[in-house]
Image: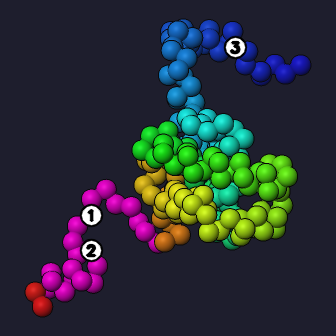
């Protein structure tokens, strides 16, 4: 028997008032704190989607991962592009559902099952067949924006897209912004 094990009772006794406050805390606030700790530690959060079902998210994520794959560098998966797409579909881009969801259903039909369950080679073949459709154009746009947009919009997790570009996020930007401003700043 491990005599060094800390039981919940021992912990609460030792923690005193802090332990009582923890038990009385709002569960939503505790969950938010745990999620923040997980993000800070670099651990993945369980996916929660505002607009997509888990199957839809898996399918659209698979498409995004073929558009911007992780082959030696971070791709759509690492940038959390699917979270950007989901957040967009729940807010400003809700009209894109009319293109994306039927397009995904078409891919599943062409695949004879879930597009996400197919091999990468099969997924590429299926995507080439729909490359000129509004579905693919919309997915390509959403994937690129989710890869490189501000992280607060749901994608570009850990600013991996910006790091790929060599972009350094600064709280304040000051001139000169580039070679064109440097010449003006010199007066010549």
Disc on the earlier residue, 1 or 3: 3
Check whether the beta carbons of the residues at disc 2 and disc 1 lie within 8 A of each other. yes
For this rendering, which residue is in front, 148 or 133?
133
Check whether the beta carbons of the residues at disc 2 and disc 3 lie within 8 A of each other. no
Element carrying mark 1: loop
Disc on the earlier residue, 2 or 3: 3
In the rendered image, which residue does mark 1 sit on?
A: 173
User: Relative to residue 164, is residue 167 drawn left or right?
Assistant: left
User: Relative to residue 72, is residue 172 drawn left or right?
Assistant: left
Give the magenta part as a residue range: 166-186
For this rendering, which residue is in front, 31 or 7?
31
Assess whether residue 142 is covered by the magenta stretch. Answer: no
Q: CA distance from mark 2 to mark 1?
A: 8 Å
Q: Is residue 19 visible?
A: yes
In the rendered image, which residue does mark 2 sit on?
A: 177
Q: Which mark is residue 8?
A: 3
Residue 118 in percent (x, y) is at 83, 56
**In the figure, 116 relative to 11: above or below?**
below
Q: CA distance from mark 2 to mark 3?
A: 56 Å
Q: Tag 3: Cα neighbours inside 10 Å, few (<14), some, or many (≥20)?
A: few
In this view, the mark in front (2 or 3): 2
């Amino acid at each position: 028997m491990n005599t060094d094990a800390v039981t919940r009772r021992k912990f609460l006794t030792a923690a005193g008032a802090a332990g009582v406050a923890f038990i009385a805390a709002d569960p939503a606030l505790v969950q938010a704190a745990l999620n923040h700790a997980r993000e800070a530690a670099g651990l993945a959060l369980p996916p929660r989607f505002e607009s997509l079902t888990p199957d839809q998210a898996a399918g659209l994520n698979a498409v995004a991962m073929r558009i911007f794959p992780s082959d030696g560098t971070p791709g759509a998966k690492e940038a959390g592009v699917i979270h950007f797409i989901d957040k967009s579909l729940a807010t400003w881009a809700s009209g894109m559902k009319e293109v994306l969801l039927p397009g995904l259903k078409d891919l599943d039909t062409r695949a004879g099952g879930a597009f996400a369950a197919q091999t990468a080679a099969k997924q590429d073949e299926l995507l080439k067949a729909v490359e000129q459709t509004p579905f693919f154009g919309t997915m390509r746009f959403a994937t690129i924006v989710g890869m490189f947009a501000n992280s607060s919009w749901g994608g570009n997790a850990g600013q991996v897209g910006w790091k790929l570009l060599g972009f350094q996020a600064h709280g304040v930007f000051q001139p000169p912004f580039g070679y064109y401003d440097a010449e003006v700043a010199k007066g010549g």
